[in-house]
Image (spheres, helix red, strand yellow):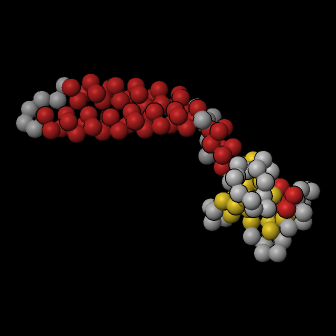
Amino acid sequence: MESHPRRSIGAQVQEIERLIAEQADRVRSVTGFGAGIRKAEAEAHLHRLRAACVTLLWVEKNEAAIKAALAKSTPTHRHIARGSLYSIVGEASLQASTDRSIAEGEILTVYRGEDGKLWARHEAEFRDGRFERIDGEPI
C-alpha cells in the first residue's frame, strides 16, 4: 500500500472549497422542472460543507490548545486511602468572610475527580501524604 504525505487541513480545505465552487456553478446552471427545489437543496448542502471547512480550519488553528486542555484533564494524582484518581486544576486563593478554620488568602489546591466534580483542600493537606502522583514523582 502506497503511503501519501499528509496534507495540512488548510490545503485540504482549499481543495474542498474549489470543488464547492465548481458545484455551485453547476447548481446555478440547473434549469427545468423542479430546478428551484434542486438548487435550494444543493445550496443548503454546499453551505453545510463550507461550515465544516470553517470548523476544520478552527480545529487546526487551535490544535495545540485543544491538546493542552485534554492533557490537563488526564488524572495526575491518586488518593491513597480511596484509590480515586484526580487531576489538579490549579491553585486558588480563598476569599471568605467567616470565622471558620480557613482564613482569607490561604492557598487551596483545586482538583477534579473522575466524575468531573471539583474539590478544594488546603495546599498543605494535598501535599501531606494523602495523595500520590501517578507518575511516581514527589508532590
Name the residue at 17% across, 29% down. Answer: 30
Name the residue at 66% across, 46% down. Answer: 69
Residue 73: where, in percent of width, then height?
68, 54
The correct choice, above or below, for 78 with respect to 76 in the image is below
Res. 32 in view: yes
The correct choice, above or below, for 126 with respect to 68 in the image is below
Residue 104: where, in percent of width, then height?
76, 50
Give the tally of numbered discs: 0
Name the residue at 74% across, 70% down. Answer: 84
Quadrant housing residue 7: top right
Residue 119: where, in percent of width, then height?
70, 61
Q: Is residue 30 left or right of residue 111?
A: left
- What is the residue that sits farthest to the front in this orientation? 99
Q: Quadrant of the C terminus?
A: bottom right
Residue 79: where, in percent of width, then height?
80, 68
**The one of 55 and 37 positioned closer to us in this rendering:** 55
The correct choice, above or below, for 110 with respect to 79 in the image is above
Res. 121 in view: no
Q: Is residue 132 left or right of residue 47?
A: right
- What is the residue that sits farthest to the right in this orientation? 138
